[in-house]
Image (cartoon, rainbow, N blue to C red):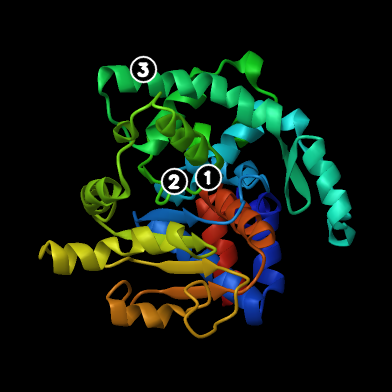
Amino acid sequence: MTAHATDAELPILDFVLTNYKNFNARATRDALIAYWRHIQGGGKMFWAVAGAMSSAQLGITLAPAIRAGLIHGLSVTGANLEESLFRLVAHHGYKDFPDYRYFTKDDDTRILEDRMRRVTDTSIPEDEAFRAVEQVIVPMWTQATASGERRFWHEYFYDLIQQIGPDKHEGNPDECWLLAAAKAGLPVVVPGCEDSTFGNIFASHVKLGECSASIVKSGIEYMAAFYDQYKVLSEGAGVGFFQIGGGIAGDFPICVVPSIKYDLAEPVKPWAYFCQISDSTTSYGSYSGATPNEKITWDKLTRDTPMFVIESDATIVAPLLLRALLECKAHPEAADALIARRLG
């Protein structure tokens, strides 16, 4: 079968290559092609995910990308970590609010009284998500307290999500990125995990004397472990950095390179690729809106690093990009031929 005969199996890639010519569209196209070429060359990709991407169901494309070997590690907020779990066990309890832009304070008060927690145009059900998971994870914490076991925050969730039987799945398990990452054993960092619902719940049990704060390894320990994880990830063709949003989810892991270089005084490969999707425009002092070349001065990136900024909504761009990459992974020769023709 010729490459041309399989173009029909690359509809999203074909769409991007055909239509995305300038501005943010061009940045999306170029970031996609550079990502694919990096993977083809034996490189790996590390994702940093801020915002509320799990509530926005990014797992629909993120989970298959993990299984396909397109993502090799993650830095996520505590909220994204737990909300991937919520979508699996409480999907039917979610409620959408497409008219949220027109809500009054009274409207949101009624949502509160209905025991829902709104995230833009959708909402997490208090009882089916928070309280149901609490019944399972708190015993894990108390048992760890009794035994003196210490683990990273995500390790508790890795165990929990794999213990939950299919009979408890309301969402599609194939669309749960946390489950895919746990099964693959991907390295994960969750900086600032205290800033999440279950971070607060854990703190309350510590305050009540029911759990020891020491059973959760600290952010410093996350970085100490990430030194070694980065060295493994960056072997061979190196590891790229793909970032959604800003804040600690991105800033924490990207710092590993200068820290190894200057603080450990050890040789280290620079990040091999950088792309950020953000709707925050460049402004004074804004990390989310800082251009990538600013990171050169912090020795996080180099002048030779392929750099891309896509100033757009990640809920639109990331699924499109991931779906095109999945097509490339499934049909590499046809994808290469199509890219050559469209860019030739």
- Residue 38: quadrant of the picture: bottom left
Which residue is denoted by mark 1 in the rendering? 196
Residue type beneath disc 2: Cys
In primary-sequence order, the first of circles 3 and 1 is 3
Q: Is residue 287 above or below residue 176?
A: below
Residue 273 at x, y percent in the picture = 39, 67
Q: Residues within 10 Å of mark 1 (few under 14, many from 20)?
A: some
Residue 49 at x, y percent in the picture = 51, 54
Q: Secondary structure at mark 2?
A: loop
Q: What residue do we see at 29% from left, 59% from top?
A: 237
Q: Residues within 10 Å of mark 3 (few under 14, many from 20)?
A: some
Q: How many marks?
A: 3
Q: Nearer the viewer, residue 343 or 32?
A: 32
Q: Is residue 2 above or below residue 67?
A: below
CB-based contact (under 8 Å), mark 3 and mark 1: no
Q: What residue do we see at 30% from left, 39% from top?
A: 217
Residue 132 at x, y percent in the picture = 62, 23
Q: Give the CA separation, mark 3 to mark 1.
A: 22 Å
Q: What residue do we see at 21% from left, 64% from top?
A: 259
CB-based contact (under 8 Å), mark 2 and mark 1: yes
Residue 107 at x, y percent in the picture = 87, 50
Q: Give the CA separation, mark 3 to mark 2.
A: 20 Å
The dot on residue 236 is none
Residue type beneath disc 1: Ser
Which residue is denoted by mark 3 in the rendering? 143
Q: Secondary structure at mark 3?
A: helix
Residue type beneath disc 3: Gln
Which residue is denoted by mark 2 in the rendering? 193
